[in-house]
Amino acid sequence: MTQKRVSSAASSNAYVQGSTIVGDGACTEFNHGVPTEERLEAFRRAVWEAGLAYARDNLPWRGIDDAYAVYVSEVMLQQTQVSRVEKFWPRFMEAFPTIDDLAHAETAQVLELWQGLGYNRRALALMRAACACVERFDSTMPDTLDDLLSLPGIGPATAGGILAFAFQKPAVYVETNVRAVFIHEFFAHHTEAVHDRELIPLVEQTCSHDNPRGWYYALLDWGAHIKQTEKNPTRRSAHYARQNTFEGSHRQKRAFILRTVLAHSGISFTEVGALLNTEENRMGRPSVDQTTLNRLVDELAAEGFFQRVDDALQV
DNA sequence: GTCCCGACAG
DNA sequence: CTGTCAGGAC
């Protein structure tokens, strides 16, 4: 399904042409493709107001200065709903209160705590990043974009989140809720495939320098509310991607294998295959052939989830 | 089926 | 740029 820009603005700066700004139903004049300062100021007021109206300030990781704690929450929230992270973050922080605790933790224990959260790779990256911070940054989280991006599992969004939430820096933080708000407010509803390139200048120009943390809380809360009340504007992002079906997928088998090895560390390759196929058959699916099983296990081992020594799989 | 406070390898 | 990754709520 190729997404194509529906509006006539095929050029890189979409908000030149459309000249239909949405947002509070008000159409404002553009000035050479850039929203006027009046428009931006009206937007800023709207964000603060919506942030107040739809605040989710009861989330346990909010209003926290500990950059490590913020970091853990941001990683957990990557492509994962708030409602799920609410249950995992407190447990994780209790088990590993400091970055040193995580850096010195057993991989098996971290993965065990991660089960049910999804995207297990994140847990490994989190541990590796913690080790890097202990070694390179004296057991603290770095507070610059470049240093954050140098850590595994931290991309532009997570780095921006840490800078804004933990360090109160006016960073560029673009994720699904932020996209939802900016697309909803600055791009006419028929505009498709809005690229982050078009959002980032707006994000930079509007971010509060007095209170970046509060600013992005407000954006997130407004974005979450917009998604509840109307069709998700993020679908009009060029970066919006649908998930493949999980049932019967490669991912589901990976998850099963990892859970099995965690529960029976040292289990043989053959036994894991038997358990997997029992499960597959129980769910009405065909057995997994040896080649595929081999590949799945090797991939997991290569990514560092466990070691494969001869026939034994050991976390 | 839909979505989720993305990162990374190829 | 595209495909992959996890899991449960709705």
Image: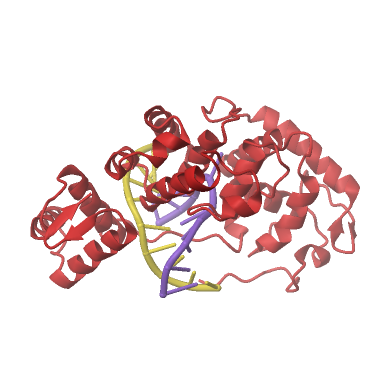
Chain colours: A red, B purple, C yellow
Number of on-image labels: 0
Q: Judge whether residue A95 can be spotted in this image.
A: yes
The residue at the point 73 percent across, 74 percent down is A10
Nearer to the camera, A218 or B3: A218
Residue farthest to the top, as pictured: A58
The residue at the point 70 percent across, 47 percent down is A171
| Whether residue A289 is situated above or below residue A114 in the rendered picture | below
| x and y, in percent, of residue A118 in the image | 37, 47
Left or right placement of residue A260 versus residue A15 in this view = left
Left or right placement of residue A275 versus residue A207 in this view = left
- Residue A86 quadrant: top left
| x and y, in percent, of residue A105 in the image | 34, 39
Left or right placement of residue A251 versus residue A88 in this view = left
- Residue A55 quadrant: top right
Nearer to the camera, A264 or A312: A312
Q: Judge whether residue A176 can be spotted in this image.
A: no
The residue at the point 26 percent across, 57 percent down is A254
| x and y, in percent, of residue A121 in the image | 38, 53
- Residue A142 quadrant: top right
The residue at the point 48 percent across, 53 percent down is A153
| Whether residue A174 is situated above or below residue A237 in the rendered picture | above
| x and y, in percent, of residue A244 in the image | 38, 61
| Whether residue A195 is situated above or below residue A36 in the rendered picture | below
Nearer to the camera, A226 or A44: A44
Nearer to the camera, A241 or A315: A315
